Image (cartoon, grey):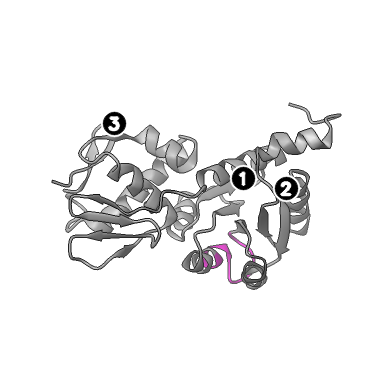
Amino acid sequence: MSFAGMPKSWLRFWLRSGVDAMRILVADDDADLRALIGFTLMQAGFDICTAVDGESALQAFQQNSPDLVMLDINMPEPNGLKVCREIRGRSPVPIMMLTVRDVEEDLIEAFDSGADDYVHKPFSPRALLARVRALIRRSEPIDAAPVTAGQLRLDPEQRNLQFGAAPPIRLTPLELKAMQLLMGTPGRTVTAEKLLLHLWGRATARERRTLKQLIYRLRHKIESDASTPEVLQTTPGAGYKLVVE
C-alpha cells in the first residue's frame, strides 16, 4: 500500500486506530535510525521522547512516563536488557526490544528481562508501525480481578501467582497473560496457536520457540519438579493445560 497523496488526517487515522497522543520512548545510539523511528511515529500521531544510551533512557523514562518503550539491546551501558529489567521492576509498561542480531539466545534473554516484543533490524517503517500498534492492542488493561483455579491464585494487579500456602511468585507481563488464559479454562487444553496469538498476535517459528521457553520458566516457578510437570502439562501436538484438581 502506498501512502503517497494520502491526506495526513486519514494517514494518522489509519495508523492510530483510536490511539490518541500516546508517548513512546525511543532509546537507540544510532542517530539516523532514532530520527527515522521518531519521524515515523510522530507522523502516526504519537508523542516521542528519545535517548541515546541506557543512562539517558532511564532518565527519560522517569521524567516522561511513556506509554510504550523501545530499547536497542546493544546501546551503550547499561545496555537495553539491563534497562528493560530496571524499567520492568518499576512498571508494566509495554517494552519492545530492537536488535541487529537475530539470535535465539538474545530473544530468550529479552523476554526473561520482561520485554513484550522483539524486532529485528533492519525493518520498514510500515512494519514497525504494525508491530507498535499490535503491541498497544495486546497491552490494553486486563481484568484486574484475582483468578483462582485449584490451589493457584493469580493476582493481576500485583502481578503475582500463589500456589497454596507458598509465598507469592512475581510474574513478567507475558507470564501473567499466559496464566490468565490458562487459568480461564482449567483442565482443558489451550492450543499453542491461541496462546501465541494472545501473547504476540502472530504464530511464527520464532514465537513458537519463545512460547516453549515461557512455559519452561513458568514450570520452574510453580512445579515441584519442572522436569515432570504435574500442574502445567503439555497436550502432545495441541498445546498446554493446567491440571489443578
3 or 1: tag closer to the N-terminus: 1
Q: Is residue 83 above or below residue 226?
A: below
Q: Residue at x 64, y 73 (%)?
A: 55
Please identify, in this view, whether the residue under mark 3 or under mark 1 is nearer the observer.
Answer: 1
Q: Which residues are magenta?
A: 73-83
Q: Position of residue 4 (x, y in %)?
A: 84, 30
The picture quadrant where one finds residue 56 is: bottom right
Alpha carbon separation for disc pair 3 and 2: 38 Å
* Residue type pointed to by label 2: Leu
- Mark 3 vs 1: CB contact within 8 A: no
Labels 1 and 2 touching (C-beta < 8 A): yes
> Which percent across, then down, holds residue 25?
66, 59
| Location of mark 1 (residue) | 132
Viewer-proximal residue, 220 or 90?
90
Left or right? Give the position of 206 relative to 147. right
The amino acid sitting under disc 3 is: Ala
Q: Please tell me which residue is depicted at 51% across the width and 44% down the height of the picture.
A: 138
Does residue 149 appear to the left or right of 97 in the view shown?
left
What is the CA distance from the residue labelled 3 to the residue labelled 1? 29 Å
